[in-house]
Image: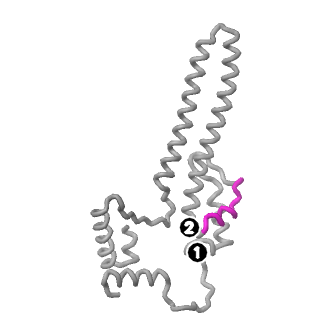
């Protein structure tokens, strides 16, 4: 919440912070959490937990299959019919292992890509996704490659799609001259009984 101090000022921030703390102390089951999502580092705990559970599930399946193969291999020693069955199962397990590893890699790519999209500063991540050449983006060594390069080009060509990246046209601003942020802060100050 510290990031609000620069926006609201010391006095309003202190009042706001106290109100939030008071609310959270009296309503622990409905606590209010405030975060600055501009950095894009936020991924919901549920989404993170789901990805970890999926990864653990794949790893568990692979370990179980490897154990089954070893047991069958020991039992098949010297028996031609069992050896044939073992070879069939080994082929099936190899295919299943590759499929699971591919799914795991896709899950890791999707998670990294979603975090990168959220951190891009794009006003509309669907529009950004449409402009990206997905064939040039790879997930290797726990990192995305090809994303940042494309992002820089897109920012240069389509700066209006990004927060704080638009350039002024040089013309006069129409309307009341008060931005939404200014009116928000003025409303917060008024609500807290503070002077400007």
Q: Look at mark 2 in the image and give the residue it sits on.
A: 121
The reply to whether the magenta stretch includes residue 134 is yes
In the image, is 5 to the left or to the right of 54?
A: left
In reply to whether residue 148 is colored magenta, the answer given is no
Question: Which quadrant would residue 34 be assigned to in this image?
Answer: bottom left
Which residue shows up at 56% across the image and 67% down it?
A: 121
Residue at position x 55%, y 23% in the image: 67
| Closest to the observer, 38 or 61 | 61
Residue 69 located left or right of residue 176:
right
- Who comes first in sequence, dot 2 or dot 1? 2
Asked if marks 2 and 1 touch (Cβ < 8 Å), the reply is: yes
**Image quadrant in which the N terminus is located:** bottom left
Secondary structure under tag 2 reads loop
Q: Which residue is drawn at 57% across and 90% down?
A: 173
| Residue 131 locus on image (x, y percent) | 69, 64
Please give the range of residues in magenta.
124-135
């Amino acid at each position: 919440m510290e990031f609000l101090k620069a926006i609201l000022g010391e006095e309003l921030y202190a009042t706001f912070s106290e109100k939030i703390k008071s609310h959270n102390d009296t309503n622990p089951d409905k606590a209010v959490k405030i975060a600055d999502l501009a950095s894009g580092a936020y991924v919901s705990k549920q989404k993170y937990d789901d990805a970890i559970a999926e990864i653990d599930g794949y790893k568990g399946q692979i370990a179980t299959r490897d154990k089954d193969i070893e047991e069958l291999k020991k039992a098949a020693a010297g028996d031609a019919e069992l050896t044939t069955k073992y070879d069939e199962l080994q082929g099936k397990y190899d295919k299943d292992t590759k499929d699971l590893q591919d799914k795991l890699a896709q899950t890791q790519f999707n998670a990294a890509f979603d975090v990168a999209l959220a951190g891009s500063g794009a006003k509309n991540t669907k529009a950004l996704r449409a402009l990206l050449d997905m064939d040039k983006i790879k997930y290797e060594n726990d990192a995305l490659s090809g994303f940042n390069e494309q992002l820089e080009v897109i920012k240069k060509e389509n700066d209006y799609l990004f927060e704080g990246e638009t350039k002024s046209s040089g013309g006069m601003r129409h309307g009341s001259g008060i931005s939404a942020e200014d009116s928000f802060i003025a409303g917060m100050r008024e609500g807290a009984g503070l002077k400007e």
